[in-house]
Structures are given as structure tokens and as C-alpha cells.
Image (cartoon, rainbow, N blue to C red):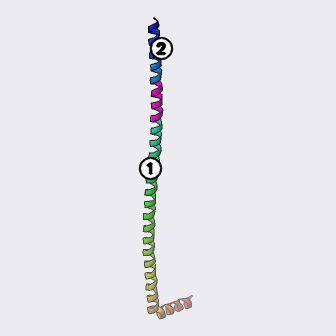
Amino acid sequence: MEQILQKLSEIEITAQRIMQDADRTKAALSAEMEQQCKDLDLELEQETNRKIQALRDSLESRKDQELTALRQQTEQHLADLDVYYKENHRQLSEDLFQQLLKR
């Protein structure tokens, strides 16, 4: 009977050790998964920031191109108006003078 109780005690101690080992393994795996999640979050944040910066750079470049084109168009329109004014100055002045007299 004594031997049976001793064997049962050994089995219980072994079971406790197995449970403690399982708890340590579980804690280690949990810590590893937590670290992997943090690493993935950091990687995703960095990738997102890179993509956002690329989009900003692209939009900035596009804006600069459109502004340059708009400036060129405006300068061309002003040059065209200047040429028109120089060619038609006398007629424009006469038309304006006539309109002022009619009022």
C-alpha cells in the first residue's frame, strides 16, 4: 500500500512538473507572439508611411507641373493681350472714347 501511495505521489509530482513546463512554454509562446505582433505592426506602420510619403511626393510633383503649365498659359495669354493691344491700341481708344460720349 505504501508503494502505491509513493507511486501516486511520484505521478502527481510528475504531473505538476509537466503542468509547470506547459505553463512556461505557454508564456514563452505568448511572449513570442506578442513580439511578432509588435514587429508586424511596426513593419506595417513603416510601409504605410513610405506609401503615404510616395503619394505626397507624387502629388507635390503633379501640383508643380500643373502650376508651371498654368504660369506658362497665363504668360502666353498676357503676351497675346499685349500684342493685341499694341496692334489695336488706336481702335480700342477710339471705341472707348465713343462709348464714353454716348453716355
Q: For numbered disc 2, what is the local secondary structure? A: helix
Q: Position of residue 36 (x, y in %)?
A: 44, 42
Give the residue displayed 44% in from the left and 8% down from the top: 3
Of 92 and 21, the residue lying toward us: 21
Q: Which residue is mark 2?
A: 9
Extreme residue toward the top, this view: 1
Badge number at residue 59: none
- Neighbour tally class for label 2: few under 14, some 14-19, many 20 plus, Cα within 10 Å: few
In the rendered structure, does residue 25 fall within the stretch colored magenta? Answer: yes
Q: Quadrant where the C terminus lies?
A: bottom right
Give the residue displayed 52% in from the left and 91% down from the top: 98
The answer to whether residue 63 is above or below residue 99 is above
Give the residue displayed 45% in from the left and 73% down from the top: 67
Extreme residue toward the bottom, this view: 90
- Amino acid carrying label 2: it is Ser
Give the residue displayed 44% in from the left and 50% down from the top: 43
Along the polypeptide, which appears first: circle 1 or circle 2?
2
Which residues make up the magenta segment? Answer: 18-28
- Amino acid carrying label 1: it is Glu
In the rendered structure, does residue 51 fall within the stretch colored magenta? Answer: no
- Neighbour tally class for label 1: few under 14, some 14-19, many 20 plus, Cα within 10 Å: few
Badge number at residue 43: 1
